[in-house]
Image (cartoon, helix red, strand yellow):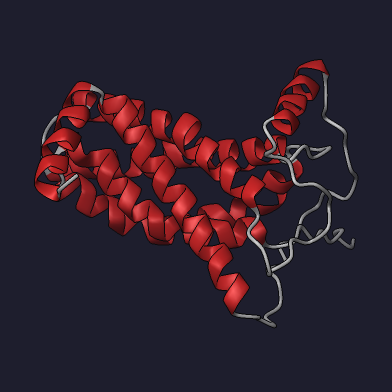
Amino acid sequence: MSLTKLLPLVGKIMQRRPLLFNSVVYGFFCTSAEFIRQNYNRKVITTSKPVVIESKQTSKVDTKGPVLLGIQRLCETLDIVDKDNSIQSTDSYNWPQLKRYAIYGCFLAGPILHGWYKWLDSFYNGTSVRIILTKLFADQFLLTPPLLVVFFTSMSLMEAKSDIFEECRIKFLHTFQTSCGYWLPVQLINFMLVPPSLRVVYVSVAVFIWINILCYLKSAPVVEHANKT
């Protein structure tokens, strides 16, 4: 199909099925970013030290209940759980992890962002400095923290970890601080210049860069250090 025929078709889908369109676009960029990260790791052998983030938590807690066990069995059936706990070889792609990013982007983050920006633009309608700053800080300090929690816990759930909150507990603060440095200027441009209908598409493109950062933080080994009193 030629580009001249494809663009009108994409435009119709975006108008008639905005939730579907935004979710697929977000999922595509999420998965593409992780694919590029894995491809880079396959070609470049790095010797850099992993990110170590201190945490007061030292005990392992099994948070699995009947519902979580059922979800994780479903994940195993869908082949999105890693085969073992060993470090993935750089000679091959981690296909279960790519599937997990696709599921997160299409079925969790994409729909959440679609609903969030739809509400935000209708509730705070206008382009004044006050409204733009309100949107900016609401997006960063009201949406981002729970979205990061959803990211880490949903990934841990799909990975069938014994404690689905452990990685979030350890990496959340460092990830949120990093997100502030990236998303505040990106979203300022978003709310100042981007039309509401293209809000999630713009964020999806920006996410392509952010997810590369997030993938790195996600792939960093979970290393805990007990606080010494």
Direction front: furthest residue: 1
**On-image quarter of the C terminus:** bottom right
Residue 168 in the image, given as x and y percentages of width and height:
67, 45
Residue 103 in the image, given as x and y percentages of width and height:
53, 36
Q: How many marks?
A: 0
**On-image quarter of the N terminus:** top left
Could you tell whether 166 is left or right of 96 in the image?
right
Determine whether 4 is above or below 64 in the image: below
Q: Quadrant of residue 201?
A: top left
Residue 80 in the image, given as x and y percentages of width and height:
67, 39
Determine whether 169 is above or below 10 in the image: below
Name the residue: 59% across, 38% down. Answer: 149
Taking the image as drawn, is residue 56 in sight? yes
Determine whether 92 is above or below 199 in the image: below
Q: Nearer the viewer, residue 228 or 117?
A: 117
Name the residue: 58% across, 77% down. Answer: 43
Determine whether 81 is above or below 217 in the image: above
Could you tell whether 167 is left or right of 97 in the image?
right
Taking the image as drawn, is residue 134 in sight? no
Q: Nearer the viewer, residue 209 or 8?
A: 8
Residue 222 in the image, given as x and y percentages of width and height:
76, 57
Name the residue: 45% across, 34% down. Answer: 106
